[in-house]
Amino acid sequence: MRKLSGIFLVGLCLGAIGAVVVTASHATAGPPARPAALSEAVPTVLATSATPTSSATPTPTPSETPTKTQTPVKVSGVDAETLDKLVPGGHVSAVVFDRQRGAATVSVHADRGYTSASLVKLLIALSVLDRGGPTAQVQRMLSRSDDDLASQFWSTYGGPAIVTRWAAKLGLTGTRPPADPGRWGDTRITAADVVKIYQYILAKAPEAVLDALKNATERGSDGFRQYFGIPDAAGKQPWAVKQGWSCCRPTRMLHTSGVVGDDIVVVLTEHPSSVDYATGSKRVTAVVEALLG
């Protein structure tokens, strides 16, 4: 009985060992188990990595990081203090609106009011063309900044009503007609509103308007050199501009506005009357140079 019991015990031990071996062989034959939470969080890593991973979410490799084309962000580093120093004793407002991003990259004193000088000719031109007026004369008024044509159109096409109509249509919150109805150059404007005018010109106005601005002459009809600001500062970048200058009620105004590459650029400046046009023009150009980098 004792021998039989010994044999019996040995048999039991061998049977247990065999069961363990069989169980192990079945376990390795099937798919390995993996934590469900980890497989849902980082499936790419688990699918491509042969090395066991920890339960912490791994850092994606460069090949796993989604790639996309991003629009370069313009960094001008221009603020109000920088621009104010370029127009000593005067005032300056500037807006650079990036058409690709649909946002302003620079906005300095954008709602400060100025008399428009010849920038109101943009609204005069839109009014004339809207009513089927002479395209060639409108283009001359814009490209050469012709005051005589502007006065004729102002009288014929509604005077101050030109300003009120377009201000309402375009949502120009800081634009209003001149106190003296006959002085179109005293129309009040802001840099923010001028940007809206250009947005309309680019999107909806007849091409004749933008063509005239692209072909602005170096000298206006009065002989004034109107390539200060944007034209002098833009270098090889394509531009289309409408400039403005006036003096002295009681100060001197010098404005440059238009399209430079993909940007709408508006710079409005007011100087003491003691600052001559040549000096003021250089200051406006310096402002645009700062904006364009």
Image (cartoon, helix red, strand yellow):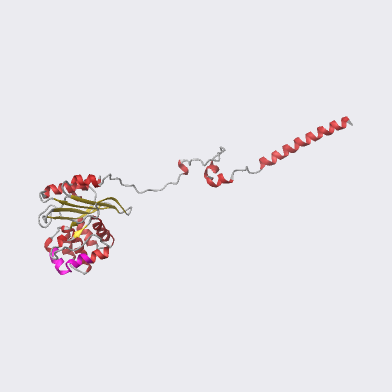
Of 103 and 135, which appears nearest the observer?
Answer: 103
Residue 179 position, x and y percent, is 15, 63
Give the tally of numbered discs. 0
Percent of width and height locating residue 270: 16, 52
Q: Is the magenta stretch mostly helix, strand or loop?
A: helix
Q: Nearer the viewer, residue 208 or 241?
A: 241
Q: Is residue 15 left or right of residue 127?
A: right
| Magenta stretch bounds | 150-164
Which image quadrant: the N terminus?
A: top right
Is residue 163 within the magenta segment?
yes
Residue 235 visible, this angle: no
Residue 229 at x, y percent in the picture: 18, 50
Horizontally, residue 275 falls left or right of residue 71, namely left
Tell me, yes or no, if residue 123 can be seen here: yes
Please tell me which residue is depicted at 18% across the width and 50% down the height of the picture.
Answer: 91
User: Quick check: 16 above or below 258?
Assistant: above
Quadrant where the image shows the C terminus: top left
The percent position of residue 106, horizontal first and vertical second, equals 27, 49
- Residue furthest to the right in view is 1
Residue 11 magenta-highlighted: no
- The image shows residue 284, relative to residue 139, as above or below, that is above
Foreground residue among 234 and 2? 2
Residue drawn at 55 percent across, 47 percent down? 40
